[in-house]
Amino acid sequence: MAANAYFFVTRWELDATPEQVYRLLEDVHALAEWWPSVYLDVKELKKGQPGGVGKLVELYTKGWLPYTLRWKFRVTHTDFPKGFSLEALGDFTGKGIWHFHPLPEGRCEAVYEWSITAEKPLLKRLSGLLKPIFSFNHEWAMRKGEESIRLELLRRKALNDVIRARVPAPPGPTFPHNFLNNKIL
């Protein structure tokens, strides 16, 4: 495996059905609202076919570390509600696959396989030396994603506006974006 190649597997157990988790993750317009610690800006460039294949999305993202990434993804395969696949282009190239497995009591296991090559010059040059730190950055982003999706599911399941207002805001981005946007860690 090349020094700038990465493979991650993330597992979340969520209080939602596979259908609910699929719909939440496919709604790219809402990503920056409910997962703002990672998704700073999201733009759908191409809608794609019915079902989502061919959808092209431009992203401006970050993790815990103070660098940002500009990349795109194209949806390459969908199998509602079992999962979907995407191709990454830009600062990352590679493939991501979401799998959604039903669990007892209306719960879901969401599994994300992310096989990428870092193409951003900083990451590409330093991956041989700093790969554990860059890997930590991804793991941090996915932990924030799990925290954020749990909060968003609670918000969407709230029976009324009073209960919805009690759900805490999702965690915001880290330095320097938290200061630029008047947000705290």
Image: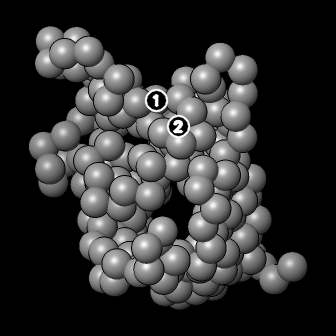
Label 1: how many Cα within 10 Å (few below 14, some 14–19, many 20+): some
Residue 59 on image: x %, y %: 37, 72
Question: What residue is disc 1 on?
Answer: 150
Relative to 102, is 20 on the left or the right? left
Residue 156 on image: x %, y %: 32, 30
Kindly indicate whether the residue at mark 1 contacts the one at mark 2 (C-beta within 8 angstroms): yes
Q: Quadrant of residue 115?
A: bottom right
Q: Looking at this view, is 61 or 105 the one in front?
A: 105
Marks 2 and 1, Cα distance to the nearest angstrom? 6 Å
Relative to 90, is 134 on the left or the right? right
Q: Is residue 132 visible?
A: no
Residue 70 on image: x %, y %: 39, 78
**Which amino acid is tagged 2?**
Glu
Relative to 2, is 48 on the left or the right? left
Q: For the C terminus, which image quadrant?
A: top left
Q: Is residue 112 above or below residue 104?
A: below
Q: Quadrant of residue 102?
A: top right
Q: Is residue 9 above or below residue 125?
A: above
Describe the element under mark 2 as helix, strand or loop: helix
Residue 27 on image: x %, y %: 37, 56
**Residue at image x 45%, y 49%?**
23
Q: How is the image coloured?
A: one colour
Q: Looking at this view, is 76 or 61 the one in front?
A: 76
**Which amino acid is tagged 1?**
Arg
Relative to 47, is 1 on the left or the right? right
**Residue at image x 52%, y 49%?**
22
Question: What residue is disc 2 on?
Answer: 146
**Residue at image x 74%, y 53%?**
9
**Residue at image x 12%, y 43%?**
182
Q: Quadrant of residue 160?
A: top left
